[in-house]
Image (cartoon, coloured by chain):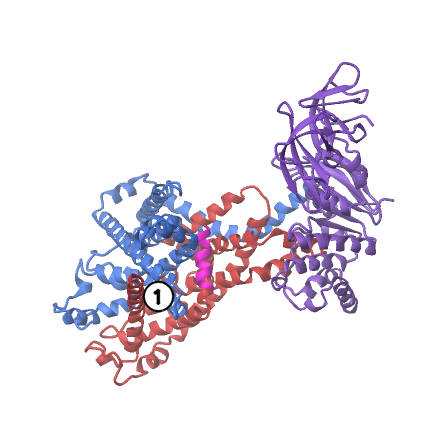
Chain colours: A blue, B red, C purple
Amino acid sequence: MRQAARSEVRLAALLVGPALACVLALAVLPIAWTVWESLHRHDLRLPWLGRPFVGLANYGEALGDPRFWSALAHTLFFTATSVALELGLGLALALALHRRFRGRDALRTLAVLPWAIPTVVAALLWRFLFEGPASPANAVLLRLGGEPLAWLAHPIWAWVPILAADVWKTTPFVALLLLAGLQGIGDELYEAARVDGAGPWRSFCHVTLPLLRPVLLVALVFRFLDAFRVFDLVYVLTGGGPGTATEPLALYIFGALLQKLRFGYGAALSVIAFGVGFALALLYVRLLGARPAGAQR
Amino acid sequence: MRRGAGRAAAAAGTALLAAGLALPLYLVLVASVTPEADLFEGMAWLPPDPTAEHYRALFTERDFWLPLRNSLVVAAATTLLCVGLGAACAWALARLRFRGRGLLLAGLLVVGLFPQISLVAPLYLLLRALGWIDSYPGLVLPYLTFAMPLAVWLLVGVFRELPLELEEAAWIDGASRLRAFREVVLPLAAPALASTAILTFLYCWNEFLFALSFTLGPERQTVPVAVALFRGEYRIPWGQILAASVVATAPVAVLVLAFQRRIVRGLTTGAVKG
Amino acid sequence: MAELRLDALHKIHPNGVVALRGLDLAVHHGELVVLVGPSGCGKTTVLRLVAGLEEPTRGRVWIEGRDVTALPPQERDVAMVFQSYALYPHKSVRDNLAFGLRMRRLAREDIARRVEGVAATLGLAELLERRPAQLSGGQRQRVALGRAMVREPKAFLLDEPLSNLDARLRAETRAELGRLHRRLAATMLYVTHDQEEAMTLADRLVVLRDGAVQQVGAPLAVHDRPANAFVAAFLGAPAMNLLPGEREGSGGLVRGRGFRVQPAPQQAPRTLWVGVRPVHVALGPPGSGEADARIELVEPLGSSVLVHVRLAGEGETVRVLLGAGARLPRLGEAVGLRLPVQCLHWFDARDGRRIGP
């Protein structure tokens, strides 16, 4: 009698084994290693110092490192702004795509394209649009009566192409997610709202938004985690510059690890980055998922 | 009256959004066939004398075939392995009963959410110890590790939705478990498998951080890395960079055009089902 | 030798739910046995145990004298018709029918011959190249049946095959199934919750409730002599009236609210239920008969009239079935009920068991 159950477990082990082994070896163990490494001093450029255990010294250094804090600030700024823009514009695009009209398929294809192209390519594209005094962006600015800017050399304006690239690339994806959610809301609900006397704005607030909440939450969490890890975009667009004015956390860690070869310190930064990102994501889920679906009005 | 105005506004909004999406792409396309000298001297909407110079230089002087080949090999290998192993894993998670099943699925999901930057160092050391820096396995394996959670997550839902009765009917008809899987489950899951394959391919084609960290030279660098590291002798060779961007995007564009519906469905099923 | 034998079958699910308590059943060659009972009574579990889709916690399954309890479904040579039909959606009707034969490596000509034969029998010949999605519910049901028939199995297992059909189609298909069974002389184990299907199709039926067998026997035998109150109320439509009463004195007089009958069987306990089928109750003027009542509801059904009456003294509601030509009583009218003692069933109120002959 137990035989069938046992052979099921064996079959499961066979089928799950390879995937599990891969993930264990290349993800779980490295994470554990990173945590362990963060407790040591390990500078590959100073090999004679060995690899002593230093407890939480690296973390202490990070907390006192102004460049770390500005990297964190940059990351949070970028994340908040891009996610807000993407959710807002994404919702608008989703509502537009929700109607049936000729060419909807073509628009959908167009919408998927920016999401599908390599981030590096998108970054280069937007860099081209903002690079130099004769860039297309400056051409537009001149047309509007302004003065040409050195966008990418400016600590504040450099954020514009960065945000523009991310929003351009990701809004369609968010829109498609929300579109799927919209399509899950039955027409009868809107009809009932109309019978109850609700206009388009009120039915949007009281029917669409509440029912869209689970999908909005998924989109929010995924986009947040993605934006928090931003690397490709900034590496190509500004390299973190001018100076370190646009350097996000991932780029700073990359520099510490593969340019300055400070593995111990870089590991500590990685753990902090992971911790902060994870904690914020959990917070989102708790805050926005907690209210029961029926509690609107 | 109000409805007409609303619809006009929606159409206008839609047109604006479409323009916003398409414009940058169009500009790049135009720029890639504009001679270098004209590039920043005020571009026109339609290039007055288009040239294929940048594309020619790309393939003859810069050997852009190399990164294209590398990307193709790595993406294809990863996709095949990912769909194969992922499907097996997903089916086991959906159908078989064993302890730790829920934990495994949750664990896989968490792994997919790790910031990859935290893994660069240990993976670098591991790959170096195995002698796999600047090699195909050195990219395929990390890609596999991070593409599989998504693949498994998508496929588990699909397998769970397939009625178990279909497999049971096949067993009663005399088919072994494996035979039933091949003849009944796989054909019905084929669309989802295709979606997963496309998404995996796109992920590999576009990946940058690991490719940057684990390759050393043009022999094994993939397209995103090659494009990002373009160097000119005196100034940035924008013409060639943009031409390379177009070439890098071409396969992606083809995939998207051909499989747009599938891609959208693959992405959104996972999300909406939660 | 019984075609199918179930020996003390028990099934307890991993979560502790008891699906089946000790079923013993022998199905003879060519017999159609119906497992009937409300949902959750364990009837589908029995089918799945015979098919090999689930393992019994205790007990054995024998098919043609062979103990198959440890065998997987592939090797049992039974065929099952699922409630949802479970047709392979991506295969044509022909391929659906041929699948089982291909698995058993029959020669191509034999497969073609059998498939076409069954298709002709079931009227599927024109539909062979279609996919299940292009068929109507009734057509899909026939394909499911055909898939089972084409394999010429040792036994057929049918899981509520008619429940997904609309009412009219159900009646027609039920008759067809009966005819098919006689033609094939096949051994069939049939599961349904519909007592009418059970009564009309079964050679023998098994009434199940909460995993326990209530009664086994030929339909009319079980109908006319139910072993307990549950079976009495379950079989037959409209359902039997069950009136609670108490035995008074030693003369076999039983009195309940609004009625008095006698004589109860000798061994009757003090509290009991008196059962009488609606068709056996006769209406007369007040005071004539064993009970007094008032008309509560009159439902003309066309070929008969169902009358609901309320017994005097706030007694139970009794259902009475009158023939088509009877006079329609008026609402609120006072009537007398005749409960002929030879049509009465007696049940112990404590455990529902039948008392008496």
Q: Is B272 part of what is drawn in magenta?
A: yes
Q: Position of residue A199 (x, y in %)?
A: 31, 53
Compared across the picture, whether B46 is left or right of C268 comes to left
Compared across the picture, whether A104 is left or right of A11 comes to left
Residue type beneath disc 1: Pro
The residue located at (12%, 67%) in the rendering is: A146
Q: Where is C324 relative to C276, above or below? A: below
State the quadrant of the C terminus of chain A: top left
State the quadrant of the N terminus of chain A: top right
Q: Which residues are magenta?
A: B262-273
Q: Where is C137 relative to C340, above or below? A: below
Circle 1 is placed at which residue position?
A: A114
Looking at this view, is C339 or B174 the one in front? C339
The residue located at (49%, 60%) in the rendering is: B196
Disc 1 crowd rating (10 Å Cα; few below 14, some 14-19, many 20+) is: many
Compared across the picture, whether C104 is left or right of A25 comes to right
Regarding residue C249, the answer to whether it shows in the image is: yes
Q: Position of residue C30 (x, y in %)?
A: 83, 50
Q: Position of residue C82 (x, y in %)?
A: 67, 51
Q: Residue furthest top?
A: C249
Q: Position of residue C209 (x, y in %)?
A: 69, 35
Regarding residue C69, the answer to whether it shows in the image is: no
Chain on which label 1 sits:
A
- Magenta span dominant secondary structure: helix
SS category of the residue bearing label 1: helix
Q: Is C158 part of what is drawn in magenta?
A: no
Looking at this view, is C129 or C343 the one in front? C343
Looking at this view, is B160 or A240 the one in front? B160
